[in-house]
Structures are given as structure tokens and as C-alpha cells.
Image (tube, helix red, strand yellow):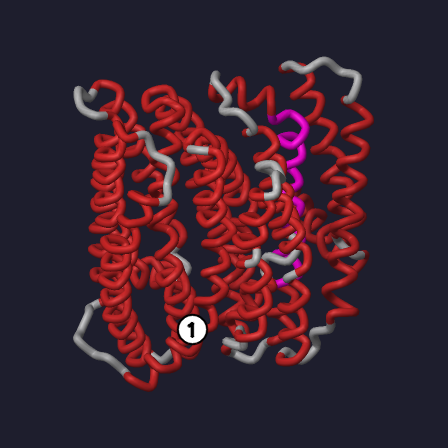
Amino acid sequence: MQSTGNKTIVKNTIMLYIRLIVNMIITLFTARVVLQTLGVEDYGIYGVIGGVLSMFSFLNSSMSGATSRFLTYELGKGRTKRLAVTFSTSIIVHIVIALLIAFLCETIGIWFINNKLIIPETRLIAAHWVFQFAIFSMIVSVTQVPYNATIFSHERMDVYAYVEIVSSILKLLIVYLLVIGNFDKLILYAILNFSVNFIIALYYRYYCVRYFEECRFHWILDKPLLKEMLSFSGWDLYGNLSVMARTQGVNMILNMFFGPIMNAAADIASRIQSLIMNLSTNVSIATRPQIVLNYSQGNHEKMISLMRDGARLTFILMLLFSVPLIFEIHYILKLWLGVIPKHTEMICILTLLWNLVVAMNITTNHVVQATTKIRLVSIVSGTCFLSVIPVTYFCFNTGVDYWFPFAYNVMMAAICPVIGGYTLQKYIKGYSINKIMLPDLLRDWVALIIICLVCYLFIQNVNEGFIRVLYTCTISTILTLFAGYYIVFPAERRQVITNFIINKIWKRKL
């Protein structure tokens, strides 16, 4: 059973990386062309308009987590009828959420665009067109959540990978049509993005209905189940509201104080942050269904082991990709974009640091959600991250510069995981903050500080350029692999890794 679970995690991780590599190559190319085609101002407008919509999408994010958790839990229990009821109930809930978000966008959202955002008057009509197509895309995405959750619950990452590769290729076609299109580029970009989202959603629904019996929707609303899901998502709602504050809320304030060009810088940094996060977190994504399944079966020891190893591997991967970028961000941005919006480099560095801090405990939240005991975590961490809005607004009014909210988020990301550890210590037998969380965090911080310090000492006297990038990548990779093996992993896990490698080599020789 354990061997099968581990093989599934490895297979799913590989499929997610294949998808990600293709997506990364296409994204790196398309981002440059889109920036050059739209221009910095329109690019910033597109980003901030999407942010207005995201202010209301936290309603969906909370139910998305609940849907995924309850579907995976019922699958682990093997209760087919309950699985079908859970799916149909979640579909009805997501339809209601989509309509509610659309209503909020068409009222509060439009008022906010007209009265609070800094958008040139000549581009206001185009901005409203972008907003309407963003709402259409949101409706498709929200009602798509139960289907995607089903695919992940069944651990069909191969299907997800193939479809997302097709989505990336279609987005490459978007760029071509954007360049040759004889129409307002900003509006055309919004229309084409909606079209791709709609096509991909249709295929996901076709696949789920054909291969998963529970996805044949019926008008069934299980009230006790709905109450349980809403109770779970109600607390998660507060946590997701804080995520919105950390990202799009900050984006709104940046626009109010610095204009759309600062939004362009923040959007580029967000793209890089998301790309590196996705490169590094496929291991944690692949472990999540196994964590929930082991919890539903009462196998807490295996679940804790998966949680710790998933976080360690995620952090090591995050180091591999982030450290070279932190030291070479100016050269890489110049090579990638040609024209770099002002302040992009510093925002990128701070968001990459946020990634590294989050990676240290990224799987802890998977276990917390598996237990459904998320109230304390959501209240405390949600309050910490929500505080970025009033604190940033106050600091900007007193003259603090653009970098503040990003640095503040890094600090909050370092503090909040302790609350998740407290919850696990209370509800999971065998878990201890002092024996598990704090030693793991200490190892991670020591590794991060050593790697960054040594890299800085090695490259400080080398001139910027392609040779220095290669030099930085080589040194940071060697240091990360060494520190990952000897510092991040404790002695007992190093022995497991060594035995695994020896067995693989021995089998090949035979």
C-alpha cells in the first residue's frame, strides 16, 4: 500500500513537471511579446483589472478547498454514492458562487474601476471591456472547480498535464493573433483569453462525465453535507480573503499611489513568483491526495512522514530555482523582456523570498485541511495577512516606498505556520512543534543563509553577464544539493535516500 502510494506520487510529480516545463517555455516567450505588443501602460491596466475581479474570487477559493477535501475523503473511504452526492452538491454551490461574484463585480467592481483606480481616460472603455470578459472567464472557472477537484482526487495528473499543455499552446496562438489583429489590442487580448478558458473547461467537463461516474450531475442538494462544507469553507473563506489582500489588495493600493506602471512591475514579479512556485511545488501538490487518503484511513504516521518529506523536497527545489534568480534578476529580466518596468527587480527578489519562506511549511496546510480543524489557522493567519492592507495604506501615506507590502508579507509568512503546527499538535497523534516543526524550520533557515552568503561571496567581484549567470547557477546548485542532503534532511532520512539510490543503481547493474 505504501509502495503504491509512493509510486503514484512520483508518477504524478513527473507528469506535473512535463506540463510545467512546456508551460514555462511558452510563458517566457509570450510574456515578452504581450508586454511589447500592449505596452507597459496597457499591460499594467490588464493586470489591475484582473485584480479587481480577484477581490471577489476569494469566495470561490474557499469552496474550492472544501470541494477537493470532501471528494478525496469520500474516495478514500470508498463510498461511491456519497461521492456522487458530494459532487452534485458542490456543483450547485459553485453555480451560486459564480452568480454572486458576477453580481458583486457588476456593482462594486465597476464603481471601484470608475472611482478608485488610476486609469487614463482614453483607456477607460477598453478597461471595462476587459473587465466584462474577465467576469465571463470567472463564471467558467468557478463552475469548473468540482470537475478539476475530481481529476485531482482520482490522482489523474497525466490528464491534467496534457490538457494544460494544450492550453499553453493555445495561449501561444493568442499571442500570434494579438500581433496580427487589427483591433484594440487590450480588448482583443481579453477576448482571446476568455475563448481559451472556455474551450479548456469544455474538455475537462467532457472527460469527467465520460470517465468518472460521480460527475453525472443530478439536482441533489444534501443539506447536512452542505452545512459541513460551508462550515469548513466558512473558516477557509477568511484565510482566502487574506490571500486576496496579500496579492490583489496590494495591487490596488500600488495603483492608487503609483499608477499602472507600478502594476506592470508587480504583475511581472507575480508571473516569476508563480512560475518558480509551480516549478517547486509539484511535489507538494502530488502528495496532497495521499495525505488526505492516509488521514481518512487513520494512518497518521505515514501522513506526517509524507508531510515532512514533501516540505523538504519542495524547499530544496525552491532553493534550486530561486537563488540564481535572486542574484541575477536584473540580467535575466533584461534578457527576457528587453524593457524592464521600474522597480521590477526589487519586487521580484522580495516575492522570491516569500516563496522560500512559504515552501518551508507548505505541506502543513494540507494536513490541517485534511483534519478540517482550520478555524484557528484561518483566523490568525488570515488576520496577519489581511493586516497588510491597512498597514500598507498608512505607510504609503507617511512616505514609505513601494517595497514595503512585499517585505511585510515575507515577515507574515515566517510567523503564520506556527499556528498550523499548534493545530496539528492538538489533533494529530505523534505530531509535536518542538520535535517536528521547529527542528525542520531551523534546518531550512540555516541552509538558506549559508547558500545565499556563500553565493554572494563568490560572485560579488564578477561582472554581470551570461558567464556570471552560469557561474551563479553552478555554485548555487552544488551548494543547494549539498545543504539539502546534509542540512535539510536529518540523518535517518539521509539513510533512506542513500539506500534508495544504491538499490536503483544495483537493479540497473543486474
Q: Relative to 368, is 419 on the left or the right?
A: right
For numbered disc 1, what is the local secondary structure?
A: helix
Q: Is residue 492 above or below residue 403?
A: below
Q: What residue type is labelled 1?
A: Gly
| Count of all numbered marks drawn on residues in the image | 1
- State which region is magenta: 307-329
Residue positioned most to the front: 398
Among the 4 quarters of the image, the one containing residue 51 = top left
460 is higher (above) or lower (below) than 276 = above
Q: Position of residue 240 (x, y in %)?
A: 46, 61
Compared to residue 50, the image places residue 67 above or below, namely: below
Q: Residue at x 57, y 58 (%)?
A: 387
Q: Where is residue 422 in the image (x, y as percent from the top left)?
A: 67, 73
Q: Can residue 321 be seen in this view?
A: no
Viewer-closest of 303 and 53: 53
Q: How crowded is mark 1: few (under 14 residues within 10 Å), some or many (20 or more)?
A: many
Does the magenta segment cover residue 420? no
Which quadrant would the N terminus be assigned to in this image? bottom right
Instruction: Give me the residue at 68% from left, 59% from top.
Output: 415
Tell me if residue 214 can be seen: yes
Q: Mark 1 points at which residue?
A: 234
* Dominant SS in magenta: helix
The residue at the point 21 percent across, 25 percent down is 184
The extreme bottom residue here reads 224
Question: The C terminus appears in which quarter of the rendering?
Answer: top right
In the image, 277: left or right of 457? left
Left or right side of 150 for 491? right
Residue 312 painted magenta:
yes
Residue located at (72% from left, 39% from top): 480
How far across and down, in percent of the image, does residue 98 sit? 25, 60
